[in-house]
Image (tube, rainbow, N blue to C red):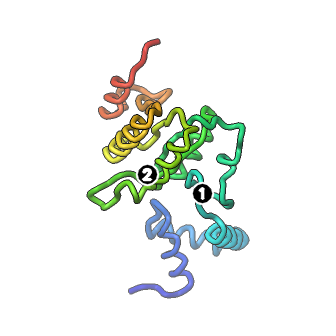
Amino acid sequence: MADNSLIGQLVDALRCLPSVGPKSAQRMTFHLLERDRNGARQLAQALLAAADNVGNCHVCRTLSENDVCRICANQRRDQSQLCVVEMPADVQAVEQSAVYGGLYFVLMGHLSPIDGIGPEEIGLDHLVRRFDEGDIKEVILAANPTVEGEATSHYIAEMARSRGIKSTRIAYGVPFGGELEYVDGGTLTHAFTGRREV
């Protein structure tokens, strides 16, 4: 039987988060209500403000409070490089590495014909317009190393190639500090096929 109490509603609401099951949601609920009421109020206010005021950048499609995100608005970034990623969290991951200084395009997913997700659903028409503006010289494909991610990267590489734009793929392989005996076969395959001269 469903619990329609305020506590039950909060537990159900927290279950929308990834990897949060009923027990974890219940622990979070009781923690907030028993030990951190101010934290609960702050969380509620921050969630409401973000839900009401965060949209998508009109240029790269990442999450942003403004029509154009801070990355796209930064004229010091390399305007000739465009890194294509699947989700806004991927932009954050690349930015935190501090190794890339170009622009981004966020697909908000990947091609998956079996799920009815085609080029239009991931904004490839918008990406084509970016290509056709003529500023992009290299597209860096950083989709996830899954079957769908690889298919999406191949599709975009063909689009770029037909417009004379160089396309590169980020390397995948053995993590720094990792031990070979613990690395799965797919990762080792990528590592060997993507090897380079030293």
x, y percent for residue 115: 30, 60
x, y percent for residue 47: 63, 69
Amino acid residing under circle 2: Leu
Please name whichever residue, 54 or 60, is drawn nearer the observer in this view of the structure.
60
Q: In which quarter of the image is the N terminus?
A: bottom left
Please name whichever residue, 196 or 45, is drawn nearer the observer in this view of the structure.
196
Disc 2 + disc 1, Cβ < 8 Å: no
Amino acid residing under circle 1: His
Q: Which residue is drawn at 62% across and 37% down?
A: 79
Under circle 1, the secondary element is loop
x, y percent for residue 86: 46, 49
Q: In this view, does 59 lie to the left or right of 180?
A: right
Can you identify the residue that label 2 sits on? 124
Q: Earlier in the sequence, mark 2 or mark 1?
A: 1
Can you identify the residue that label 1 sits on? 58
- Which mark, residue 151? none
x, y percent for residue 37: 70, 73
In the rendered image, the residue lying farthest to the left is 114
Is 47 drawn above or below residue 87 in the view shown?
Answer: below
Mark 2 and mark 1: Cα distance apart in space:
14 Å
Q: Which residue is drawn at 50% across and 43% down?
A: 131
